[in-house]
Amino acid sequence: MMFRQLKEDIAIVKEKDPAARSSLEILLTYSGLKAVRSYRRAHWFYQRKMYTIARIISQRARHKTGIEIHPGAQIGKGLFIDHGMGVVIGETTIIGDNCLLYQGVTLGGTGKDKGKRHPTLGDNVMVGAGAKVLGPIHIGNNVKVAANAVVLKDIPNDCTAVGVPARIARREGQKVEQDLDQIHMPDLTMEDITMLKRAVKCLREEMSELEQQSHSTQEA
């Protein structure tokens, strides 16, 4: 069972990381793989209420990998943490199958909630580098969260969320294929700035016309 799980984990890394060259390299050098394997051991103890042992395992993994996964989190199969430094996954987080997290991702709480304090991610979710998903919110299946986005509200299935706070930039009626592209996403902040510039330009043109009319009236 253990070796089969390890084989599946290595296969996922090969599938999702074009830089992966060999199984041995992945096994020895990939911090995300080490963190997930340590989480599984810690979670086993956590489920049996051996909380101190569970936390010791998770904290040792944090020290070695820079990735902090609370042993109480519930994580499905196929999770891949790429690079991984600075990733934090809170105690009541739930992650579905075949999800992808990049470095600097936080699946955390807001400090305002009791009980279920952390987010729930569906299947095939990608969370870009530096993104924060905070509170007991639900992220649907096949969702892509852009790099550095801050998600504070539920995101439905098949959406792309960008910005601070995050807004839905794309929603399709069909399944969104997961890929590694964090660049080609609409930048809503720049779109807002462009709209403001256009509005200012229109106002300036109207003011210029009014000034010309005023001068014409005075001359007459």
Image (tube, rainbow, N blue to C red):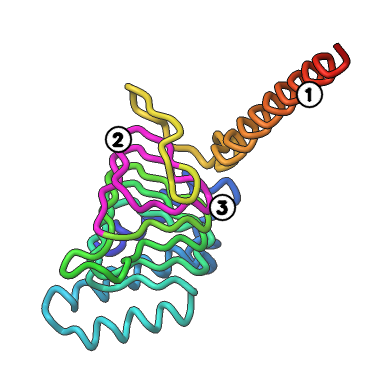
Range of magenta residues: 136-161
- The residue tagged 3 is 20
Q: Which mark is residue 211?
A: 1
Q: Which mark is residue 53?
A: none
For label 2, the SS is loop
Asked if residue 137 lies in the magenta stretch, the reply is: yes
Asked if residue 127 lies in the magenta stretch, the reply is: no
Image quarter of residue 106: bottom left
Amino acid type for the residue under numbered disc 2 = Asn
Name the foreground residue: 160 vs 165: 165
In the rendered view, would you say 61 is above or below 4?
below
Upstream in sequence: badge 3 or badge 1: 3
* Percent x, y of residue 110: 32, 66
Separation (CA) of disc 1 from disc 2:
52 Å
* Percent x, y of residue 27: 47, 64
* Percent x, y of residue 108: 34, 65
